[in-house]
Amino acid sequence: MQDLDSFLHGLLAESGDTPDRLLQHLIAVQKQYSHIPYDAIQVLSERLGIPPVQIYSVIEYYAFLHRNPRGKYDIRFSDNITDRMLGNRLLMQGMCKKLAVEPGIPRDDGKVTIEMTSCTGLCDQGPALLVNGIAVSKLTEMRIHKMVGLIEAGVPVGKWPGKFFIVEDNIQRRDMLLNKRLIKGSALESLLVKGADAILNDLDESGLRGRGGAGFKAGTKWRLCRDAAADEHYVVCNADEGEPGTFKDRVLLNSYADSVFEGMTLCGGIVGARKGFLYLRGEYLYLLKTLENTLQERRDANLLGNNILGQEGFDFDIEIHLGAGAYVCGEESALIESLEGKRGIPRKRPPFPVTSGYMQKPTVVNNVETLLAAARIAVYGGDWFRSAGTPESTGTKLFSISGDCERPGVYEYPFGVTIRQVLEDCGALDTQAVQLSGAAGFTIPPQEFYRQIAFEDVPSGGSLMVFNRQRDLLKMVLNFTRFFCHESCGFCTPCRIGGRLMNDLVEKVMVGYATSYDIHELKKIGRVLQKSAHCGLGTTAPNAVLDTLQKFPGTYSRRLVNKSYEPAFNLDKALEVSRQLTGRDDEEAHLRLGN
Amino acid sequence: MSTEKTFKLDGRDIPFDDGDTVMDAALRAGEYIPHLCHDPDFPPHGSCRVCVVGVNGRHTASCTLQASEGMDVDNSSEDILEERRMLLQMLFVEGNHTCPACEKSGDCKLQAVAYHAGMLSPHFTHFFPKRSIDASHPEMMFYYNRCILCGLCVRVSKYEDKKSVFAISGRGIDSRLVFNSPSGKLGDTDFSPTDQAASVCPVGAILPKYLGYETPIGQRLYDFKPISVVGDETARDIAKDKLTNGGPDE
Ligand SMILES: Cc1cc2nc3c(=O)[nH]c(=O)nc-3n(C[C@H](O)[C@H](O)[C@H](O)COP(=O)(O)O)c2cc1C
Ligand code: SF4
Ligand code: SF4
């Protein structure tokens, strides 16, 4: 392997030694050496001018960075509830056993590490895993068996059978966005012909709202950014797509990346930005090469770079930054922190990114789908777009559909479609519940399937997970509370601690120890999170618990120890305090009642 | 006639200047809003959420909330008080806070704010994390058990002392304070008792060595006056005083 010093010097020479490069450099070092060696921290500290302590804190923030060596084959099983429903636990246990490795701990010979990770965005073709960062879909016992053989034989991942790595688009329904192809450069030509104001008017007329969840009007956002005076402006495409059950951006980046870049460049031209970033979640590393190629094609076609399409002063280029396993980095201000090379802690808002974003400069942050739609609107007009959808939710929306249905995949629907319609189309039978908008979203019972997906009724960032009547919804809830514990950035008290308390209480319900008092506690803590957390992760983390408590009370009540309001007092459990303090756990330190 | 801008805090008019936060203006007007991660001498942070107030039915941290004309701020409804108590209880169960055995008892803001908020017990199930002590520094002690991750030492060391001795590492419930040295030990950093960061810790996490109960319990800072009356500066002075009085006995 290349010696560390020359590797780092190459890296620093090639991509710069400003502090904002830190995260990208750490990702490169991690990839090369399966960890960040102490000597690398020294060099980076000196060259980037960042105290070592801050570098440690960045490494320990991102799930995909490590200070101690990982295995040569570093494996992470995706652990969304949909992966679970497809049997990921058993597959992982089997693999651990065959390879004689404990979850999370590198094997003695340093060959392999295996552990779980948050949803990798392959819910429609799971169970899935990442091997050295690259996605493997459709896991079966057979596939695992073969992987074990390849690992023991030391075959490099690059030489594994190509079919392991096939990720299908699975587009099941197309509508106006996916049906209408965009000729490369046509949105930019439209900008040069019509001018920025006309395009902004088109966007206003189209009614396009952000597709990342919050639904802010895209035209308004671009205008606010343009009007914020500053020497630099930036455009950021949010391709963090970390919401469990969401994978439509993956498909857009795989098959429509050119349109997304076109949308970014259009935005750059309008707000006066010269630089754009695509923030790509680390889980989508396998898309990086084609994305880079698409960027190069656009540079070659003079659609990126200086004097775009011959227009003097229309300069814009795009750089791809990788994430490293942190869901909260999808939150726009945490994303900006991460782009600046730091821990992804959400900023105080206001100021909002449109006035103070990347490097404190006015910045537009938009979802992948928003940018793709904006490019089409620039060509086909606002009326075209608003011809579909509802008054408050115009146009069409992509949905990622997974779980208990015959045809999982990506579906494009006009806003206003009913949940029932979607379930019919994807072949969902005997449905008990739909989880809309991911772990942070809403749990919808059958009596509400008549409802429309739209900002006027149930809003959605585009994830829809289906659960049939055989499923235990509490498993879903527990999967989500664990997810939020794992993904909380830890900055604020309610989410860091309250999230963990809620998770522990749900676990207590699961094992049959909880009383109605605990249910009352869950509701109270949930409300504190909703009311006082610093960012959207914490305020939405209790949603699934609170929704299921309200709409599926039986899921909880049938497990309670004592259905009255009294707290159950468990003498032996009460002694746990003393056991913990004295470090004892022997027979004598336990009360065995009733035997 | 005065053209002073004001907002209402529990019905009282509070004057403010442009750029003031609700916290800034309230403290200046002598109105106490409980806070732990905030110290008015340093930029606000907004992490502990104990300063939560209600505005238009929404709850938000007052230390980062810009004051605006005519705002109606709720600092005392049962809703707000209960939320604060729960946040404090969360902080108590996250670490290991055995007050009777802590040198900071009586001078501790966490304890004092808890009294002020009427918190009677930690209520939630304790996490009892296994945390250690760092005694590597010749003059200072660090107690991981008591750190509430307020980030004050981090910010003050970085921006005031220009040293960056501390950082918060990890994430979620595994967040923890780390020190700027190859060994990870406080003793191998350039931390000094004369640093401003040495006297900002609201709890007993950063304390001078060789100092035990010089001031008897019952005669400490918050024993005489509640935290709503004692200013943050006085608290810092007491801490500084201890730092200069520390050191090995002859
Ligand atoms: C915890 C959290 C995670 C988020 N993750 C994403 C994401 O993965 N992709 C995304 O586009 N927006 C995400 N958002 C929303 C962004 O903060 C932001 O609203 C969005 O990128 C704006 O783009 P839009 O207006 O085009 O929707 C997330 C928000 C929160 C609070
Ligand atoms: S709610 Fe608080 S702890 Fe949770 S992710 Fe947001 S800032 Fe971090
Ligand atoms: S050591 Fe004290 S000042 Fe530093 S983060 Fe912990 S509680 Fe705050």
Image (spheres, coloured by chain):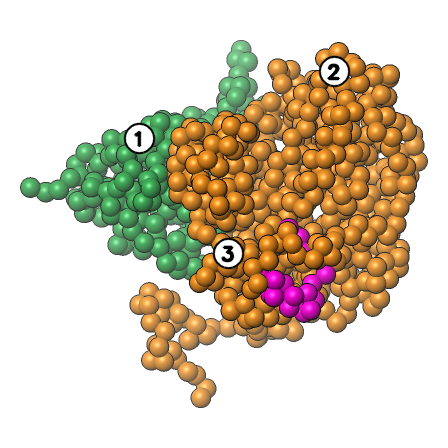
Chain colours: A orange, B green
Per the image, the residue denoted by label 1 is: B196
Residue sitting at the far bottom? A595
Residue A45 placement (x, y as % from top left): 41, 33
Per the image, the residue denoted by label 3 is: A71
Q: Nearer the viewer, residue A528 or B226?
A: A528
Res. A529 visible in picture: no
Q: Is residue B171 left or right of residue A522?
A: left
Res. A579 visible in picture: yes
Q: Nearer the viewer, residue A424 or B5?
A: A424
Which kind of residue does numbered mark 1 sit on?
Answer: Gln
Q: Is residue A153 above or below residue B203?
A: below
Q: Nearer the viewer, residue A17 or A158?
A: A158
Q: Is residue A483 left or right of residue A168?
A: left
Label for residue A307? 2
Magenta residues (range): A134-151
Instruction: Tell us which disc is closer to us: 3 or 2.
Output: 3
* Residue at the image point whose x is 25% and y is 34% from the top: B192
